[in-house]
Amino acid sequence: MLAAGVITAVLIGQWLRQSMRSPAGLSATPEQQQAVSNSIVPASPSPPRPIEPAVKLAVPAIIAVPPESAITATQAPVPTGRLADLTELLKAPPSAQLRWARFKANPAVLVIEYPNLYEQGLAMNRLAAMFEKRTARRDRVPTDTELAAIMRRSGDSVASFYQGHDYPAAKVALFFGLAETQRIPLNKREQQLRSLTLEARLITRSPSGTFEASESQAVISFTGVQPDDPTTGADEHVDAVRREAVLRHELSHGEFFTDPAYRAHCLRFWRQELREAERRVFTAYLKGLDYNPADDELMANETQALLMHTPDGRAFNASSLGMDEAALAQLRTRFRSGEPTHGLNR
């Protein structure tokens, strides 16, 4: 996942989890929301219509995923739908509305593009807090108050919490199931996300009403280009280079969740190929970004995405880890040894 931050050569977290100083908490003033809206250029010739929770989504036909008996992930056919490769995703015209597609090289990955960081944050931040932050509980969905406290602790706002998101389908199903069981009120963007993932068959509802998922799928998100807000102390600027790096980074997480061979390679690299001292460097770095260091798979997943799929020197470079460029290049060479073919290297 791309945690956001101010882009420096030292801290990727200041890019991947921008230290934007938008209003704290889960809402913005009408003036601030209008400022965000004004920064987005409508799609040409016309943007997709908004996706609202109670509205049937206008999406391509998909293959239904058979209902399962439990919320835990099980193997199931991967739905099809509108497919887009990396170039198509990046070259899509600006849109003031959310849009989505399946990654052509790996249709198990559902890609959502939000018009801006604020819209993305409203939809995805509670998921991020529940599954990745150090102090959050994994067995319950954080309330608005708890989420606001987590963001304050890291000095973040709705927009700056993350620049991109990634979740396996099973976690999405678990999140929405627990929110319903706990009667946690979801905001409109979270309800929109629930409707979209149901419509896209990332998750399904069983006859008993529980949410279920296929382990073969994942959802990722990124945003459109947007300018910086000069009234804040953070860097909200998303240019074309940053946008591409975020998308590549998140797609690599999608590959980790859905491609068993790539996942096995990443875990082997983390657990066997990296030296203990090298693992400590990455773990300390990720802990500093407020990731949960006790989650071994999260550490492996974030490491592969940073090391191999974050092509923006402003965001991640050798100095981010306190090493020289030759040492970083050597780590990348070691990762490529035995790396299987996957959706980002075909």
Image (cartoon, rainbow, N blue to C red):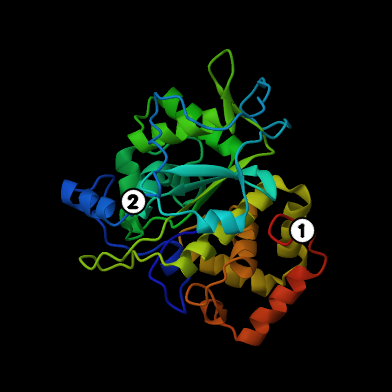
Q: For the residue labelled by badge 2, is the local secondary structure a helix, a strand or a loop?
A: helix
Q: For the residue labelled by badge 1, is the local secondary structure a helix, a strand or a loop?
A: helix
Image quadrant where one finds the C terminus: bottom right
Q: Give how far across and how far down residue 300 sits, in percent.
A: 65, 59
Q: Which residue is mark 1?
A: 265
Circle 2 crowding by C-alpha within 10 Å: few under 14, some 14–19, many from 20: many
Q: Quadrant of residue 83?
A: top right
In space, the residues marked 1 and 2 are separated at their CA atoms by: 34 Å
Quick one: label 1 or label 2, which is nearer the N terminus?
A: 2
Q: Which residue is mark 2?
A: 118
Residue toward you, 145 or 250:
250
Q: Give how far across and how far down residue 240 sits, in percent.
A: 46, 66
Specify the farthest residue to the right: 338
Q: Are marks 1 and 2 in contact (CB under 8 Å)?
A: no
Residue type at the position of mark 2: Tyr
Q: Give how far across and how far down residue 209 sits, in percent.
A: 53, 16
